Amino acid sequence: MVLQLIAGRASATFLASGVRGLATAKLPDLTYDYGALQPAISGQIMELHHKKHHQAYITNYNAAIEKYAEAEGKGDVAAMIALQGAIKFNGGGHVNHSIFWTNLVPSKDAAPASGELLQLIEARYKSMDAFKAAFSAAAAGVQGSGWGWLGYNKATGGVEIATTANQDPLSTLGLVPLLGVDVWEHAYYLDYKNVRPDYLKAIWQVVNWKNVAERLAAAK
Amino acid sequence: MNAIELKAPPYPLDALEPHMSKSTFEYHWGKHHKTYVDNLNKQIAGKDWENKELEEIVLASWNNGSPTPEFNNAAQFGSGWAWLNSDKSGKLSISKTPNAVLPVVEGKSPILTCDVWEHAYYIDYQNRRPDFIQTFMDKLINWDMVSQRYAAAQQ
């Protein structure tokens, strides 16, 4: 049984296994061709990013939870603790990239933000342009590997920009992810080399605001 | 003014082909490393640190575990580095530093390092970091320099 999960309900694809009930991760399909996000992101990057990088997180996550289940069965707490880093890193990688693919859409099919999403963004950032500038600045400022996010804050009922390091999911900051932009070098290096700000300027052409709005609706 | 200098590698930028391309050097040294040096020089201009050696700046900006902004540019912060270190007695240790610490702030003397930021290998190896590391180990290490550093660490 494949649990294909809806935006906002949960954020990644898992295959429920009969044996021991371990829900292993599975690579989700993209809803567009690898080349469909050009020129913002090349087909070469999309293919490497999806088929190699995301797949590696999945493979390593599945291996880690398998070992974790074994250790748990034996009551081997030291081994369980030792595996938690791998689960956080690879599980986070799977969650984050699964969100990312749905946050992107070919530019010809992209529509601007509207409705409640636009209202919440304008309430916090005054205008869409100001939001984009603030988001790009935050994402450009991530030191090393990480992600830029627009998150929903259930406590305040508002949206905010945040960043996470490595593959830490946005949930670690207590926010619901609406839009994530990967700023690991593998996400842009072949196209933009060291010029991360150019990537962050271009990516707005392919943001799927409809998906971002769906995630907001599901989060409330 | 005594600015930190971006030194050129001791070989032409294409000298390590095919294992590490000229293109990688043009970006890695010519852009990434240069940016760290330029940014650090801007940060230390007009301050005491302007006349200090790089290692002193690293240690001072590490600030006992609460790094000041200069640390990032002095200490090559980032995705990660692998290190072979020596202590004063010649005992070797391997360590890795994700996103922060240089062995020098732990009192170790590094004698060999491998940069595993994606920019260090992505043009030539894309996602295949293990292939990059294997090639680095087999073909690129300057063992003469490592030996010199090993001897110096024991002084």
Image: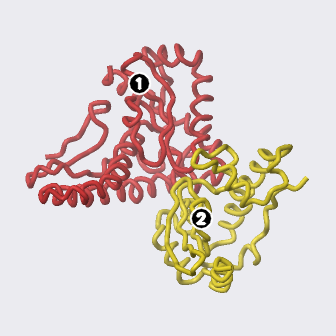
Identify which residue, B99 or A188, lies in the foreground.
B99
Does mark 1 fall on the same chain as mark 2? no
The image shows residue A13, relative to residue A124, as above or below, that is below
The answer to whether residue B10 is above or below residue A77 is below
Q: Quadrant of the C terminus of chain B?
A: bottom right
Instruction: Give the residue pinned by disc 1.
Output: A152
Q: Secondary structure at mark 1?
A: strand
How many residues crowd mark 2 within 10 Å: few (<14), some (14–19), many (20+)? Answer: few
Residue B14 percent across, percent down from the top left: 71, 76
Residue at the right extreme of this rendering: B1
The amino acid type, in three-letter code, at marker 1 is Tyr
Residue at 55 percent of width and 63 percent of height: B81
Q: Horizontal placement of B126 versus A65: left or right?
A: right
**Percent x, y of residue A154:** 36, 20
Label 2 and label 1: CA atoms lie apart by 43 Å
Q: Chain of mark 1?
A: A
Q: Depth check: A168 or A149 in front?
A: A168
Q: Residue at x 48, y 67 (%)?
A: B129
Numbered mark located on residue B104 in the image? none
Residue at x 62% of width, y 23% of height: A130
Chain B drawing hue: yellow
Q: Chain of mark 2?
A: B
| Residue A178 pos. (x, y %) | 41, 30
Q: Where residue B151 appears, x then y in whole percent?
A: 66, 83
Amino acid tagged 2 = Gly
Identify by letter the chain in red: A
As drawn, A36 above or below B82:
above
Residue under pointer 2: B107
How packed is label 1: few (under 14 Cα within 10 Å), some, or many (20 or more)? many
